[in-house]
Each structure stands twice: as C-alpha cells, then as structure tokens.
Amino acid sequence: MRVSSSTGGCLSGRQVQIGSMPDRVIHLVCNAHLDPVWQWTWEDGLTEAISTFRVAADFCEAHDGFVFNHNEALLYHWIETYEPALFKRIGKLVRTGRWHIAGGAWLQPDTNNPNGESHIRQFLLGLLYFKQKFGERPTTAYNFDTFGHPEGFQQILKGCGMDSYIFCRPDHGTYDLPIGAFRWQCRSGVELLARRSDDHYLSWFDITRQLDKFLPHYADEPETMILWGLGNHGGGPSRREYEELLGYFKKRPELELRHSTPENFFAKIALHHDRLPIVGGEMQRSFNGCYTSMARVKRSHREAESLMASTERLCALAWWYRRADYPVKDLDVAWKDILFSEFHDALPGSGIPQVEKDTLELLGHAREKLRRVRFGAVHALIGGAPAGGKTVPIFVLNPHGFRVKTVIEVDYSTDYCPMGDIEIVLRRNGRRVAFQQIEPPNNLCLVWVVRLAIPLDLAPWEIQRFEATYIVNGYKRPPLPALTRSNLELTAGAVTIRINPKSGLVDSITARGGSSSFVAAGAFCPVVFDDIDTCWTTGDPAQVTDLRAQFMQVPGWKKPSGRFRLATAAAAAALSPLPSDKWKKRRRLAARAVRIVESGPVRTVVEAIFVLDHSAVIRHYVIDHKRGFEIRDRVLYNHKDTMLKIEVPLGFEPDRSISEAPHSAVERLPTKSHDDHTNQRWTAVIGAGRCITVSTTGCCAHSLTMDGLYLNVLRSPAYTSDHLIPDDPWHDKRFQPRQDQGEHEVRYAFQFSRRFSEPAAAQAAEILNVQPVWQVYYPDGCRSLAPLANCLTVDRKDVRIVAVKKAERSPSLIVRLLDHGGRGGDVVVKLGADEHRCELGAYALKTLVFRRRKGGLSVREVNLVEGL
C-alpha cells in the first residue's frame, strides 16, 4: 500500500485536510446487511430477506423523508419470485425516491478468489437486473463485509461504470488508511473514489454511542457518512434507533441530518477530488485464514470458472460462425450458480458445514450444466469424413486466442476387449504422431479403455483431428525402468531435475549448461504448521496471548511444526495394497515409497509417498521431457487445527514475489515470518537473476520468507469459529468437526527462467486450468470441421483475449482484451478477414463489440458491462 496526496506530499489519518463548512452535513445511509448464507442456509437467508424488505417497505411508507438503501440483485430476485406483491411495493418506493437501489452487483462476493471475469459478471448481471426491473443504475459499489480488496479491482469497478466504493474491512485499527474518502488507484493508473466506513456497516441498537464516537473521528470531512441499520441476518431500520436519531440531531442544531444515499455523499466528496490522498494497490490481510479455509470449495469454484471460460468461448464462436444457437439461458443459470458460490461467507470458508455442502452442490450443478452446453458447442464445431474400420476419431479444440503447446490425456474405448497388450497407432492427417500410452482409469485386465498422453501444438482456436487404431501382433509394452539415482535425474524442457530416492524430494533443478540450482535440497516437502481453530484467521497459536484477539490478526509462524517423511514399504503398502503383496506369499513387500510409474517418449512420472501421523501425500512428479515439470498431489488429510503447505526452499535470495490478482498482478516483499498472502492461479518468486513461476489448480495463498516459498494447500479449523473457548459447556465437551478432512487433489506446474514474464505466467496458468477440449466423435461426412484456426487473434504476445461471448442485448460478439506487458500502445484485433486497431493502455482492459453489417463488420468500444 502507498498513501500520498495528489501533489506528492505524504498524508495519513487525521492529517487529511479537505476544508470546512459552517454546518456539518451528516449523510445517514440506512441499510440492512444481509448474508444469504453464513450461520444459516439459503432458505433461511431467503425468508430473512422477505422479512427485512417487508419491514423496510413499511418503514419507508410510514416515515416521510426516510430513505432505505439496499444492494444485491439476488435478494430482489428472490422477492420478485416469492413475494411479488412486496416486489411491486418496492418498485413504487424506488420510483418515488424512498428506496434506493444500491451497490449494483449480483451480491457482495469474496473479492480475492474470483477471477476478473467473475467480478465483471457480478456487475453485468446485477446492473442488467436493476435496469430491467427498476430502471435504476447505481454508481457507488460497496462490499461492506468482504475480507480485503485486491489490486486490479479498481479497474474492474471503474470499467463497470462505478465511480466510488465503500468498504469496512480491513477494519480501522488493523490497517492504516486515510480517515474519510481517498482516491484508490491500481497499477494501470485507473482510480476511483473510495472510503472505509470505520463506523462499520451496522449499528447494533446503539446508534447514539456510535455517533458520539465517530462524528469526532470524521471531523475533517467536509460532509460525513454514517451507516446504520441492523444487519448480518438482515434487520434494517428499527423504530427505536430512528427515534433516537431524531432526538440526537434535534439537540445538535449545528449538525444537518440527511437521510441519504452513497451516491449523494460521493457527489459532494467529488467536489474535493484533487485534494484527496491517493492510495495505491491492494488493501489486504483481513481474515487471512480465509485465503485457505474450505480449500475444497475454492478448488471446485476454480474448476467451475475454468469450465465456464472454455464453454462460453466455444459457444460464442459456434454461434458467430452460425454452427449453433447461443445457449443464453443455460449459461445464465451456470453464471448465477458461480456468482452465488462467491458470496463472502461461502467461498472464503467461514460458513457452517451445510453451507459448504450447499456451495459444493451449487458448483457441481454449474459444472454439470456447462459440460452439457460445451458438448453441444463442440459437437457443432467438429465434423469431417467418416472414420473407417477400427479407427477412433479424436477431436481436440483450443479454447484460447494464443498458441498452445501442451500434453493432454485422452481415453477412449476399443471396439472389443483383447487380453494383454495391443500396439496403438495414432495419426494426424495420415501421418503417425508421437504419443505415450498410459494407465487407464479402470483396473481391468482387459484392454477396454485406452489412455494416451498426446503432445499438442495448437494454433489459436484450432481444431485438430487425430485417428487412433491398434494392431494385435504380439506387441509387448516395454517394462518400467528400475529405480536408480541416474534414472531420477530427468530432463524437463530446459532444466534438469534430480529427485533423491532416499527422501522422495527434489534436491536440485538446474538450467541447461548451468550449475546453480533454482531450489535447495529437499524441495517440495509437504509441511504442517500448528494453527488456531478459527476459520477466519490463521497464525501461530504459541504467540496468542488473548483468545479474543485471534479473531483479527495473529503473528505468523517462524517455521513448520511438522514435516511429512518418505513412507516405509509397509506404510506404502497399507495406503494402497498391491496385488502382489496381497495375494502372493512373500517375505519382502513389493510396495515402494518411490517408484517410476510411467516412462516413455513423452514423459516420465515418478511416484513418491509421504506420511505424517495419520495423513499422507501420494505425489506424482510429471516430467514432460520437452515442456516442463508438474507436481500432482493426492492428499489424504486427517490433521486438525493445522495448515498444510508445500515448502520450496530457494537456491537464491528472493527480491520479491508477484502473483495473479483479478485481471491484474501484485508485487510483495519477502517477510521474516510466514505472513500469508492471496494469489490466484500463478505466483512467481524473483531474485538474483532467477525466477520460479508456479501455476496451480487449487492453491489460493502462499507465504514468502527470506529463504523459501510456501504454497498453501489447505487448513483444518473448526467451522464458523472465531475461537473455541476452554471450559465452554457447549463447545468444549463434545466432538467438533474440522474443515477439509479427507482426500484432495492439487496440481502445480513450474517454470524456471532467468527473468519473469507476466504474459508467459498468465498463459501457463490458463493452459493448466483451461485445458484443450477433446471429444471422441464418429462423423458421418455431412458436416465439415469448422475452420476456426486463427479466427480471432491479436498481434501482440503480451495482450491476451480474456473473454469471448455473445452480447447481452444485441446479436454482437464481445471480445475483451488485457495488457500483461505494461507497455500499452496499439493492438490489432483480427476477426476472420477483418482487422481492427485500437489503443490499449498499460495493464488495461478493453472491451470490443463486433457486429455484422451489410458489407462487413462494425466495431466499437464499450465499458466492461456492455454499455450499461
């Protein structure tokens, strides 16, 4: 964070001088913060929304001049669906100015885990709903209870037409910010007005004490805003507080009371824009335990986001090239499932067990619907000549606007079930291509399902057709190599990786022709840290002196409290009994904790099994000989009140880290203790002319110390706990379940280089999470393959196409661009034979609308919410 005045002088706290007025104007903004889920399920949240909105409507109708403010389009949609008469009353109050449509988003989400496109859709769907139902368009966004605010969110808010932002966390006293409004700026230079409501978002039946405390606190503001109303489980205005407010201001004629709205307050503050301090970057480390809590939910959400990306893009191209209708309703349902899952007490992991279960089911519903929709798009795009004989046609589609070089895993059924080995032949355009036969997902002796690892080189949006067949000729698959130290020295692209057979860990990773290692010996060890039992906060319990303080911030750890060790043969056999150990009488177990389980022309896979107490990690080191290095961990976790991380001891001194943020990236310095920070799909560590970049499918946080990177995997606190108090009669004498027990799967892909490249990091993370789509299909020759290769491209490698979709309100194609290079300048977008040149600022987003007209295409630029 940086704090400065617009003229360069340093300002903080009460030093901010904006001006004075003879009489203070106090904007009272009545609201009812309502969590749709948290300590209750959505059914209870829905009924509370009905009660809260009914009370608020009664209050508006009974008190002249009173204004009620509420956001979250989801809640209005619930009222419209289940209480249409109340919805009509609200509409009338909106038209008369007594009820203010606020916020603009679908709901108040977590802002750290959702990607940039999810944030845009929160506003696109929310603003579209408010426009259609009420004719209203809020311009002040707010996230009262969200646990931190990431770099890049400024540009998203401004691009969605929001000119101001209200938040409450990080709480006053835990994070230094100016008192009152400031200008919040991101690395692209985009800024908007923002204000932390230090008085918080609800009044707890004690509004006069709140006014006595915070009116002096805000003394230097030209006009002041106070939030009031009961909240969390709804509530809104109360008659008692309203009467107390009137009495309070009646005794203080120097104060002018206004029942107001956020927009009215910021309209006054905007008059002093140039004199406001500037705050840059993220505002974070509020409830840092929620960066990792409920890791299973976070991974499921990321899978849904990734599936949505490939599905929406392919559906848009299938529609644009007239191969299929655009599935508007199905995508809308899936998006709303994803957006609901992002609520700030669901995705961060602070809800009760039923909320976790409901959120996983919601995301499962979204993924199932998206798979069906994506199959329809793929089916519409593929085609060609019929396959002959025993040939199996396999179609692979690139869902990205850049060239993709990777390996995919494909499985298909044979036409009958031969016993023993068969020789697989794979061709493309009549020529044999490289592949590697790997183990199928079943455990049958019959060759019923074949699984292949196929190297790909796909042009942007390209569809490739492969043809697989087999020969029964006595072919024998080569045996796996014996485990030796030399066999564990493996080439992965431009680096050599050495795995220690005695520890199962990586001892060195060196560049071709180099001698110094990117990592220190014993790299990638799973380690645990003793943790506190609250879902919100994480840290070292040995440094906690007051249980009441741990709800906010706890000091970070100095070192791990436990390390996983390589399993013994007996422990490895117990985790997954081998048939040779189970059915044959042997003195010595065949099971081994380290073994080569795949070997061939494409890749080598080394399996290592680690254990600690009652938990285990079954790891696969996937060494792609030409492209890189990946770790796939299957975690069997039974530890309680602990944090699990992957330890990457560095072979160099780190200068800084840089991590993906929503449509952006953020830099941070290493720390002496383990201070957790958020990341999205990638994180890089840079120093001494070397860089390690890691892309992940499920790691959402990390810590960087002076000598190591630690990737958060999961943590296991109690559910919805701010602390479990000793000798409490209700909680201390019974079993309390912990989060994220059981089995988890996480993947990490690593890049090792001399310097950091954000475009390369972004592309690698995209490929890992949004993989090429494959489908076995037997065409009948009636439909050709859609010629999509290079159909939509940009002429710069540092600019990425981050969204392709049909416009919400017209038969137009939306294409969104993001500059990763930070240099700005012109970029040429090519759609079919048409080219469009536009200017793109450094790290900026740009949304283009393409529409077919007579004689060609028309192109125009719109904001992130398509002109709303």
Image (spheres, helix red, strand yellow):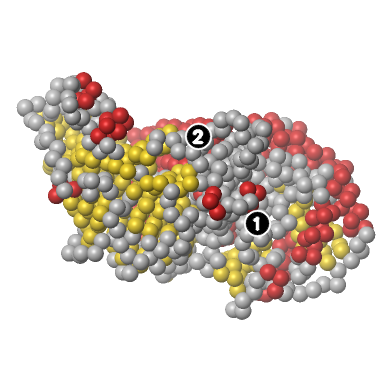
Left of 612 or right of it: where is 538?
right
Label 2 close to label 1 by CB (< 8 Å):
no
- For this rendering, which residue is in front, 684 or 797? 684
User: Residue placed at 79% from the left, 42% from the top?
Assistant: 56
- For this rendering, which residue is in front, 172 or 579? 579
- For this rendering, which residue is in front, 851 or 234? 234
How many other residues sit within 10 Å of disc 1, few (<14), some (14-19) or many (≥20)? Answer: many
How many other residues sit within 10 Å of disc 2, few (<14), some (14-19) or many (≥20)? Answer: many
Q: Amino acid at mark 2?
A: Leu
Residue 856 visible in the current orientation:
no
Residue 592 visible in the current orientation:
yes
Q: Whole-percent x and y of residue 321?
A: 37, 44
Is label 1 in a helix, a strand or a loop?
loop
Q: Whole-percent x and y of residue 510?
A: 23, 60
User: Residue placed at 64% from the left, 74% from the top?
Assistant: 11
User: Residue placed at 68% from the left, 47% from the top?
Assistant: 71
Give the vertical position of 562 relative to 40 (above or below): below
Which residue is disc 2 drawn over? 360
User: Residue placed at 87% from the left, 63% from the top?
Assistant: 255
Q: Residue 420 sits in which quadrant?
A: top left
Q: Quadrant of the N terminus?
A: bottom right
Left of 669 or right of it: where is 131?
right
